[in-house]
Amino acid sequence: QVHLVESGGGLVQPGGSLRLSCAASTSDFSTYAFEWYRQVSGDQREWVASINSRGNTAYEDSLRGRFTISRDNAKNLVYLEMNALKPEDTARYYCNAQRLRGDEHEQYWGQGTQVTVSS
C-alpha cells in the first residue's frame, strides 16, 4: 500500500505559478511511475502529465510548455511545476502512483490539492 499526499495548491492570479508536491510513503519509490490528473467538480478526471521510473516524461498536449513534472527519488517526492496559469487550470489536482509487478498492476491515488486561478 502506498499513501500519497498532495500539497502546494492554493489561490493564484492568472499568469502566476504554483508548484505542487506529491509525497509517497513507500520504500520502493524509484520503481513507481507517477502521474498528475486534475478534475473540475462534476467533470471527468483529466490526465495532466506522467513521469516513469527512468524519469521520462509525457504531457497533455495543451499543457506542454507550461507544466513540468519531475521527481526526487531521494526525497520520495513528485512535483508539478505550473506556470502561466489560466482560470481554466482551476481544478483539484491528484497524484497517481502505479507499477506493474508480474501480472499485478498496482495503482494508488492521493486525496488531491485544490488549485484556483482567479483575479
Image (cartoon, rainbow, N blue to C red):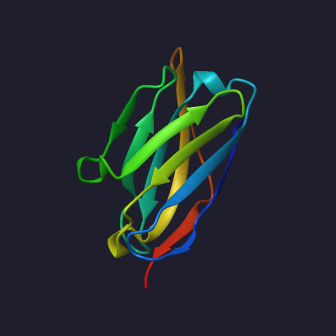
44 vs 87, nearest the viewer: 87
Q: Residue furthest left?
A: 61
Residue at 58 percent of width and 60 percent of height: 112
- Where residue 59 appears, x then y in whole percent? 33, 42
Q: Quadrant of the N terminus?
A: top right
Classify 99 as above or below 48. above
Q: Quadrant of the C terminus?
A: bottom left
Classify 46 as above or below 117. above
52 vs 43, nearest the viewer: 52
Q: Is residue 117 left or right of residue 95?
A: left
Residue at 30 percent of width and 52 percent of height: 63
Q: Quadrant of residue 85?
A: bottom left
Residue 50 makes an appearance in the image:
yes
Q: How many marks?
A: 0
Q: Is residue 118 left or right of residue 79?
A: left
113 vs 110, nearest the viewer: 113
- Where residue 91 appears, x then y in whole percent? 45, 69
- Where residue 12 appears, x then y in whole percent? 50, 74
Q: Residue furthest bottom?
A: 119
Residue 105 makes an appearance in the image:
no
- Where residue 43 appears, x then y in whole percent? 36, 69
Residue at 47 percent of width and 62 percent of height: 17
